[in-house]
Amino acid sequence: MKTGLKITLLATASALISTSLAADTLLWSTQAKPIEETQAMREQVLAGFDGEVSFEPADEGPWQTRLTAELTAGSGSIGALGALHGDFTGVSDGLSDLSAIDVSSVAPGFVELGKLGTDTQKYIPWMQATYIMAAHRQALEYLPEGADLMALSYDELVAWAANMHEATGEPRFGFPAGPQGLKHRFFQGYLLPSFTGSMVTEFRSDAAEDAWNSFLALWEHTNPASTNFSFMQEQLIAGDAWVVFDHTARLADAFNQQPDDFVAFPAPAGPAGRGFMPVLAGVAVPVTAPDPEEAAALVRYLLEPETQIATLRATNFFPVIDLDLPDDMPASVQAAGPAISAMSGADDALPALLPVGLGSLGGQFNQVYSDTFERIVLAGQPVRAVLDDQAEALRRVIDEAAAPCWAPDAASDGPCPVN
């Protein structure tokens, strides 16, 4: 009798737990994985949702495996998906159409990326991190006449560096060309897209030659010790450079330690646009979601201004919408936020995504851009000859990975062509 009652109670409890779990909308995410971020997502971000939601982060492999299994089975328990742009590209057919969600407050370039090359909204941009420019306030007096710090061109950046060099007798531009520097991201996501509209296909084009010639002009006014620079916050604080490029995380100490000394601003624009490399995360709803309407409500909630700010506090990823940040945010966030917003929301914004589909060949892909820099800029080899040569190396990597094109290059059916 007692055994039967025990079994009955266990079955009842199991049913209650199952019912409770089934009632929750599961947000299955590759983001906010560190325990502190996970806890903050649950307690500070999602706690305000008018509904039941559970947040479970996972590495990319398990995230993909579970999603694929549910899509193959035709049913599942995942209500919503949080992931980087590249994580969604392989599962586009398994994502619901979210075109009914209002994305008017989101930067148009991000909205387009969320369509994954289709006519429907496959995911809603959620949060972003990126690279920006920073300058010591001493440098501002040398800006070219009429130049707008928040909308510079590459020509104006070169002229600015030249003005500082001439006036002070020292090359004041700094670049992260050291062993741990992120120079390859500048060439992939900023310089080449701004001149060519491409990261891969136009690698050896005439426009790419113009891009490298522009960088050569900038290098004439760059601190030669830049080949040892890796985290540009150090050079800003030490005064080794007055104007720099780097990831927001690698500039944070300068703003936090000396908030009155430095300013942040968007990357410059070239003839093809204002190339920049967002680390863009989005939220989507799989076609197998048990409660699609509740999942869509969660997606809308994540896009609200208050939720975007809470997400910034929880993850250090910036909002994808234009909003005023609270005064109690760290100085680095206060400085970078407007620069990121101006860059991603600019009329000429040209998002260039992190490489997609390269797998273990990502390092070789990056090396092609680093080698091109070293041959053209450091070794002084002819631009045209180096581009023709390095284009072959780039093609070999892309073909071996069979990686289709990603933004800003147009989608391709097979390996992304290097023209």
Image (tube, rainbow, N blue to C red):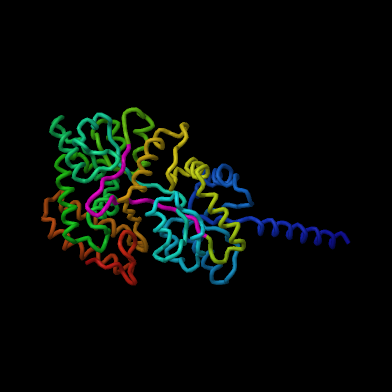
User: Is 372 or 211 nearer to us in this picture?
Assistant: 211
Q: Residue furthest right?
A: 1
Q: Residue at x 58, y 43 (%)?
A: 43
From what the image shows, is residue 216 above or below residue 8? above
From what the image shows, is residue 203 above or below residue 228? below
Query: Where is residue 249, by image quadrant?
Result: top left
Q: Which residues are magenta?
A: 264-284
Q: How many marks?
A: 0
Q: Is residue 279 magenta?
A: yes
Q: Residue at x 32, y 55 (%)?
A: 352
User: Is 135 or 246 nearer to us in this picture?
Assistant: 135
Q: Is residue 186 magenta?
A: no
Which percent across, then down, holds residue 125?
45, 53
Q: Quadrant of the C terminus?
A: bottom left
From what the image shows, is residue 217 above or below residue 353? above
Q: Quadrant of the N terminus?
A: bottom right
User: Is 29 or 93 nearer to us in this picture?
Assistant: 93
Left or right of 218: which side holds 319?
right
Which percent across, then down, holds residue 373?
20, 52
